[in-house]
């Protein structure tokens, strides 16, 4: 679906502009990513159940590993070695501390346990901090297919049950966000899996047939106007949002943004002839969407190491380097493993996966951690 590729391009460019200090509301691109993931993954799961009558969790997780792990491992190893070689000791320490949690897809909870504020820490202190969102998605990929399989096993109108569960858990997630938010620092509810689940589940909700058909009936022939109106609402939200200063985001605003994004995704996927869909399907946006995963992985370490947001020269250099590395990752690492590597399937694939994970774990153990800075007690006071 070309328009959804373009939507991914918009999302990743918004995140890059946010981290470069050029678009305060660009962090909502992550929210758009979540909703897209919920929609696309759920559509794949439902299609498999409809075709085969069941769901192969092993096959699903195998596809996710082949899609996501090669680029992630490449970034983790490369960035860790570069940081260990050239970066200050404090950055080396946080990198080696965060790395194992990134590997375990739990880095969002690790950062919360360390009381690392999302809104204050984008000053160069951590090169893997942006991977909290990848951890949330991976946790969703682990749990949601199991729940869909359970619901499908009961027979009957299982998509209706999937819709009911997705909507119910999404509302519960919103309630948790409202109850747990700290207006002074909403990091807990912004990066916690439980309080962000609604972004993924609203996308999943729109992917179900009952909701999709009801949505298309509701808009009727006005689908082009409705799509344009929803896109305008999202654009205004991106223009007005300002992170920690927008408390309204964490008391329902993010939920409303995710709901609008889900509606836009559902309508665009089934009405590719609208003006907005044509715009999103333009080749440059589609290309950025195709490299969006690797571009997201690479951009923040590059921004930290090159000092992006410290003048146009550094910012332009960081953007260029991130795009080049992302393209190289897609064409030299991701696509070969995903589409052409026969060894990545079956028992051989399992062996390779185990060896890669073991080697990555060894990296965190073998790289020496710099000693903490010495304090001269005689000079205190």
Image: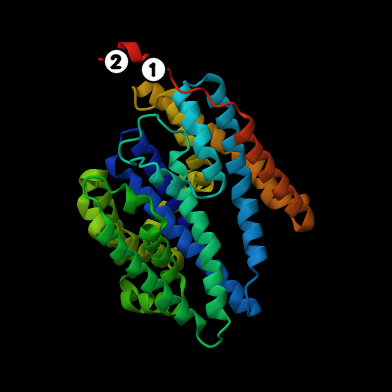
Q: Which mark is residue 375?
A: 1
**What residue is at 52 percent from the left and 44 percent from the top?**
101
Q: Quadrant of residue 179?
A: bottom left
Q: State whether residue 216 is above or below residue 2.
A: below
Residue found at the far bottom of this picture: 156
- Cα separation between marks 2 and 1: 9 Å
* Residue 279 x/y as whole percent: 40, 52
* Residue 155 x/y as whole percent: 56, 86
SS at mark 1? Answer: loop
Q: Which mark is residue 180?
A: none
Res. 9 visible in picture: no
**What residue is at 65 percent from the left and 77 percent from the top?**
52
> Which of the two residues, 364 or 39, is positioned nearer the viewer here?
364
> Which of the two residues, 15 or 133, is positioned nearer the viewer here?
133
Q: Classify 10 Å Cα crowding around label 1: few (below 14), some (14-19), many (20 and above).
A: few
- In this picture, residue 4 sits left or right of residue 334: left
**What residue is at 43 percent from the left and 56 percent from the top?**
34
Q: Quarter holding the C terminus? A: top left
């Amino acid at each position: 679906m070309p328009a959804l590729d373009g939507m991914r391009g918009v999302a990743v460019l918004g995140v890059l502009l946010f981290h470069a200090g050029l678009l305060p509301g660009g962090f909502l691109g992550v929210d758009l990513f979540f909703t897209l993931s919920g929609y696309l993954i759920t559509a794949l799961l439902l299609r498999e159940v409809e075709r085969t009558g069941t769901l192969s969790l092993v096959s699903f997780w195998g596809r996710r590993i082949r899609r996501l792990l090669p680029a992630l491992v490449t970034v983790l190893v490369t960035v860790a070695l570069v940081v260990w070689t050239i970066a200050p000791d404090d950055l080396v320490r946080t990198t080696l501390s965060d790395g194992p949690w990134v590997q375990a897809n739990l880095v969002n909870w690790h950062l919360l346990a360390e009381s690392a504020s999302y809104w204050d820490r984008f000053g160069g202190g951590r090169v893997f901090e942006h991977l909290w969102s990848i951890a949330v998605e991976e946790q969703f990929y682990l749990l949601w297919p199991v729940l869909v399989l359970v619901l499908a096993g009961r027979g009957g109108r299982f998509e209706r049950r999937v819709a009911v569960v997705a909507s119910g858990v999404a509302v519960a997630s919103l309630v948790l966000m409202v109850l747990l938010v700290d207006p002074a620092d909403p990091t807990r509810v912004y990066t916690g899996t439980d309080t962000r689940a609604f972004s993924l589940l609203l996308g999943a909700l729109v992917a179900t047939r009952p909701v999709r058909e009801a949505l298309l009936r509701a808009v009727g022939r006005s689908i082009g106007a409705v799509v344009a109106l929803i896109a305008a609402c999202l654009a205004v939200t991106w223009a007005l949002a300002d992170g920690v200063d927008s408390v309204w985001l964490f008391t329902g605003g993010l939920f409303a943004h995710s709901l609008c994004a889900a509606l836009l995704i559902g309508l665009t996927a089934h009405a590719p002839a609208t003006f907005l869909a044509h715009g999103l399907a333009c080749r440059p946006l589609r290309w950025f969407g195709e490299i969006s995963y690797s571009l997201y992985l690479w951009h923040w370490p590059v921004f930290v190491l090159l000092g992006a947001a410290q003048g146009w020269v550094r910012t332009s250099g960081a953007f260029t380097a991130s795009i080049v590395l992302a393209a190289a990752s897609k064409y030299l690492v991701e696509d070969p493993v995903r589409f052409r590597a026969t060894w990545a399937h079956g028992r051989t694939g399992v062996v390779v996966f185990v060896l890669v994970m073991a080697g990555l774990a060894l990296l965190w153990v073998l790289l020496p951690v710099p000693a903490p800075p010495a304090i001269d007690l005689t000079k205190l006071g």
